[in-house]
Amino acid sequence: MLRIAVPNKGSLSEIAAEMLTEAGYSGRRDSRKLVHTDAKNGVEFFYLRPRDIATYVGSGALDVGITGRDLLLDSGSEATEIAELDFADSTFRFAAPAGGEIREIADLAGRRVATSYSKLVDDFLRARGVEATLVQLDGAVESAVQLGVADAVADVVSTGATLRAAGLEIFGPVILESTAILIGGANQHEGIARLLRRLRGVLVARKYVIMDYDLPVDQLEAASAVAGGIESPTVSPLRDERWVAVRVMVRADEANDVMDRLYDLGAKAILVTAIHAARL
Ligand SMILES: Nc1ncnc2c1ncn2[C@@H]1O[C@H](COP(=O)(O)OP(=O)(O)OP(=O)(O)O)[C@@H](O)[C@H]1O
Ligand SMILES: O=P(O)(O)OC[C@H]1O[C@H](OP(=O)(O)OP(=O)(O)O)[C@H](O)[C@@H]1O
Ligand SMILES: [Mg+2]
């Protein structure tokens, strides 16, 4: 059995569970259950705190896991990144009171920096020769400055709304670009390649759509330049020899722009359909 660690709570848990379902695995029905066996697919899921997942995988107790890159690096575990999973994208940044005197990381020398990711921040500051005092907090780090326990913070930033609401402003270099990742350790289980293939299929299905359209034959080159597909567009003859039917995969977030451009080339009956599953 392949033993997989999945986040039981927090920002990663819902999408991770959705992706595994879309990849054809069965999941737990009760959110208090900590272990679930999918015998048909030969996998066992362990629902764990996202922060602990790298520790379990790095020690070899579990074969693979889904976590955040920031959490992996903060853990100091020997687990390594196998693939990006394209969700929970965030940056890890320093922030301090807007318009205040802390404007670059050198200004942190001798100051207090609140964070939930002490190792990540300590490694970053050490490598740049800045000596600050880290204040380890569990969450809601943005309140630490207002409440007087720190002079600056280092935390996950997505939209920046939480920082702004706390009167803070980003400064200094990007500490880390993070995203959800699949991690592995020393265990070379044969099921890992299959899991990865399935998850990649889910990523493709989420990211791409199928576009079908009819096109005057003489516009084929121009249309292929607009939407070239993964390999190359599928072109089928129509009864009217001046026209062809084209089928191509297009990035979902570009679909409307591509439709406009194909329409301008003379394409007709442009249809977009979702992909439910894929193996590329
Ligand atoms: N607002 C956000 N947008 C995108 N990713 C986020 C956001 N907040 C946290 N993450 C990412 O989620 C992962 C953290 O997961 P974790 O479940 O520990 O934190 P959380 O979602 O903050 O949970 P909680 O705060 O409820 O404990 C990290 O990889 C982090 O980068
Ligand atoms: O840039 P934003 O879009 O505002 O998102 C960033 C915030 O989201 C997360 O907080 P979460 O809700 O997980 O609470 P926490 O601070 O208690 O972890 C993160 O820790 C930031 O505080
Ligand atoms: Mg959080």
Image (tube, rainbow, N blue to C red):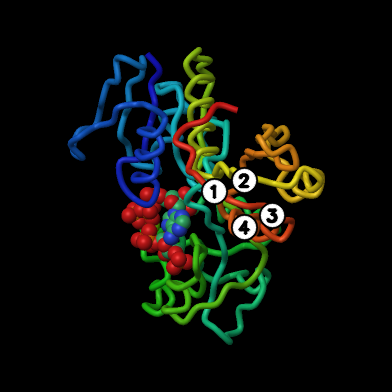
Q: Quick one: label 1, few (<14), some, or many (20+) residues within 10 Å? A: few
Q: Are marks 2 and 1 in contact (CB under 8 Å)?
A: yes
Q: Position of residue 33 (x, y in %)?
A: 20, 33
Q: Secondary structure at mark 1?
A: strand
Circle 3: residue type: Leu
CA gap between label 3 and label 1 equals 11 Å
Q: Ligand 3 appears in which quadrant?
A: bottom left
Instruction: List the residue tagged with mark 3.
Output: 262
- Label annotation for residue 213: 2
Q: Residue at x 61, y 84 (%)?
A: 101
Task: Indicate which disc, 3 or 2, sits on the residue closer to the N terminus.
Answer: 2
For numbered disc 4, what is the local secondary structure? Answer: strand
At which x and y percent is residue 18? 36, 40
Question: Would you say the residues marked 1 and 4 are in contact, meaning their CB atoms lie under 8 Å apart?
Answer: no
Report how far apart the C-alphas of labels 3 and 2 lie in the structure.
Answer: 9 Å
**Mark positioned earlier in the residue sequence (1 or 4):** 4
In this rendering, which labeled residue sits more in front, label 4 or label 2? 2
The label on residue 271 is 1
Element under label 2? Answer: strand
Name the foreground residue: 198 vs 42: 198
Numbered tag placed on residue 175 in the rendering: 4
CB within 8 Å, label 3 to label 2: yes
> Which badge, 3 or 4, comes first in the chain's sequence?
4
